[in-house]
Image: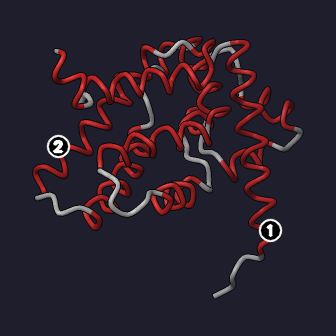
Amino acid sequence: MVVPSPVRERKKRETWRLVHSAALRLMTERGFDAVSVDDIVAAAGISRRTFFNYFADKESVVFDPDPDDAALWAALLAERPPGEPLWSSLRELLIGYTGATAERMLLQRRVRLASPELSGCSREVADRFWAAVREWAGGRTGLDPLRLDLTVNAARTVLNTACPHWDADTGIAGLHELIGAGFDFVHPSPSERISS
């Protein structure tokens, strides 16, 4: 088996990000339907063949995961301190992930707003992310499977509810504010519970 060289892998990632960024910028300006694959390859300075080496179609440019996403998830999960309550870990994980991918998320949000037919999210990517989170949480908590799924799914619901309410003009800080408010609403701090 031939192992790809680190330089080749780095170049592949750079090309993926170049094409992805060029496509999202064009789609933000013109709308999804008004941008062709030819427009994307011209903006990225690549050939059609190179485009199709990385993406199956225009939709893939919007929804495919970054090649380093799995490594990012693993690093963010590893950063959570032992003994931290799971709900706090999940909140910090979402803040960390959205912060690390802020530019991409802002562009994706603007493309979705400009193209209502793309308002859905990439369920496959989201499912893989949350499966990784659940596996991590299961190995770190003593929660039974029902409570574990309820907690992880509640965090997922917070993110899924916050995103459609997010005004991209507020930047990633606006999304973080919505995520924080959602986490506080679902599981308020002891002082908030007493006052309500």
**Render colour scheme:** secondary structure
Residue 142 vertical position relative to residue 154 in the rendered view, above or below = below
Which residue is at 45% across, 40% downward?
A: 94
Identify the residue under disc 1: 8
How far across and how far down the image is residue 129, in percent?
Answer: 41, 50
Front residue of this view, candidates 23 and 171: 171
Q: Which mark is residue 150?
A: 2
Label located before the other in sequence (2 or 1): 1
Front residue of this view, candidates 21 and 117: 21
Q: In this rendering, would 107 be left or right of 120?
A: right
Front residue of this view, candidates 92 and 22: 92
Which residue is at 17% across, 43% downward?
A: 150
* Type of amino acid at the residue the image marks with label 2: Leu
Which residue is at 54% across, 12% downward?
A: 167
How far across and how far down the image is residue 34, in percent?
Answer: 68, 14
Nearest to viewer (mark 2 / mark 1): 2
How far across and how far down the image is residue 42, in percent?
Answer: 86, 32
Which residue is at 59% across, 37% downward?
A: 99
Q: In this rendering, would 147 be left or right of 164?
A: left
Label 2 Cα crowd, 10 Å radius (few <14 / some 14-19 / many 20+): few
From this viewpoint, which residue is outermost toward the right? 45
Disc 2, SS? helix
